[in-house]
Image: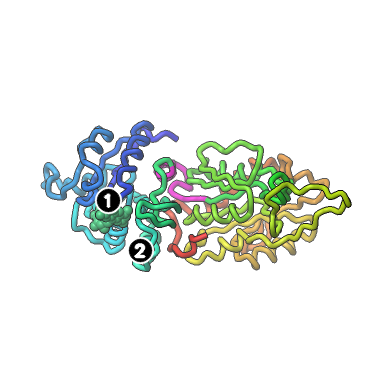
Amino acid sequence: MSLAGKRVLLIVSGGIAAYKALELVRLLRRDGCGVTAVLTQAAEQFVTPLSVQALTEHRVYTNLFSLTDESEMGHIQLSRAADLVVVAPATANILAKMAAGIADDLPTTLLLATDKRVLVAPAMNVRMWEHAATVANMATLMARGVAVVGPDEGAMACNEYGFGRLAEPPSIFAAIRGSLAPGPLAGKHALVTSGPTHEPIDPVRYIANRSSGRQGHAIAAALAALGARVTLVSGPVSVADPAGVEVRHVETAEQMLAACRLALPADVGVFAAAVADWRVAHAADLKLKKTPAGSPPELTLTQNPDILATIAAAGPLRPTLVVGFAAETHDLRMHAEDKRRRKNCDWIVANDVGAGTGIMGGTENEVVLFTEAGAEPWPRAGKDEVARRLAGRIAEALGGGGPTNTGVEIAARTP
Ligand SMILES: Cc1cc2nc3c(=O)[nH]c(=O)nc-3n(C[C@H](O)[C@H](O)[C@H](O)COP(=O)(O)O)c2cc1C
């Protein structure tokens, strides 16, 4: 979806990452999106109104009382004229003011006066992000339907490491597109896992399974088609990345869990990946060689993290709707119902992947959807069709409107 004809009100607050707002403006303008920018006083210390004005090709606003005609209530008009209000970067300070409803300058007055969807891209030092005040403020904002993109984990300008880095401009751009997309899942964030995991034995060998990633990738595409912003965490597969979806490529179960945690918060999590239950406890650094005696190496396995159960137990950060997959070769109903309860998921999509079904790695699927209401067998169909049907059910379950997460537990994001 192109953003041509759309208008974003971009509020830049005073963080070290403010310069990245310029790159975001460039991406938006390149896509035909109009941008009106408002800078906090602190933001002016980091970027000049002139450079923002040059890129937006529009007047930049900084002062509540300098709007040309306050008799027309310029701040109200500004806050209503845009299709979406974006705060990037969002400092701890502006998030706190938003949560408290403080309106003591132009940006915060606009944020209080707007009737439009609001997307924030937090950026701050890891300790500020993990501070109980910020945690509570984020929970308040998200409960009110404010959409969030990032922050990312990484090295910071202050020489510390952790969560708090501004999401990269292309990710913020994707989140803006998601928030403006038409469709029942507009403004929702979906996390989808897909494909197998590869668990190394040595640098050239690994333990894997027959998952092709076709079903998970089709679900990611179907959710995106309904307007969701989708993060797809994919194991090694040969199917192409779906268009319009942010894909994080991983190999092992541990990497997949870390990528999933990083992608939270999400409104829905669909865990379709065939994650290896075990990995080799100590993968060899060098290729294992045959011994003259002909004795094969002994591999000691250890349990991998349970991604579905971990994300379903992520406290306030748990996606509103958690959908697990169960690939079984026998006693499908018993295993699926048990898995739904044990792993605290809302739905289980179960399929029989026994020999001869052609499902694992094939193009068709025959699933039973287990919900609180019971079991619902779906007819055998192409994986794209199953994905569309599941995406439709997810849209029904989440309803329209803004994001539905009820809170955020920042500590839970630390991998
Ligand atoms: C060099 C420098 C870098 C800063 N970077 C950040 C930051 O990345 N995130 C943040 O929340 N605050 C940061 N601050 C603090 C904010 O600038 C300060 O809280 C300010 O009051 C924010 O005002 P605003 O929210 O109205 O823009 C920084 C301050 C300085 C001096």
Give the x, y percent position of residue 408.
44, 62
Secondary structure at badge 2 equals: helix
Going by the image, does 147 lie left or right of 217? left
Decide if ligand 1 comes within 8 Å of the CB at mark 1: yes
The answer to whether residue 188 is magenta is yes
| Cα separation between marks 1 and 2 | 16 Å
Expressed as whole percent of the image width and height from the top left, the position of residue 53 reads 23, 36
Residue type, numbered disc 1: Ser
Residue that protrudes farthest toward the front in the picture:
292
- Return the mark for residue 13: 1
Residue 363, quarter of the rendered image? top right
| Position of residue 374 measured from the top left corner of the image (x, y, whole percent) | 66, 62
- Residue at horizontal 58%, vertical 38%? 241
Tell which circle, 1 or 2, labels the residue nearer the N-terminal end. 1
Quadrant of the picture in which ligand 1 is shown: bottom left
Residue pushed farthest right?
293
For residue 134, the mark is: 2
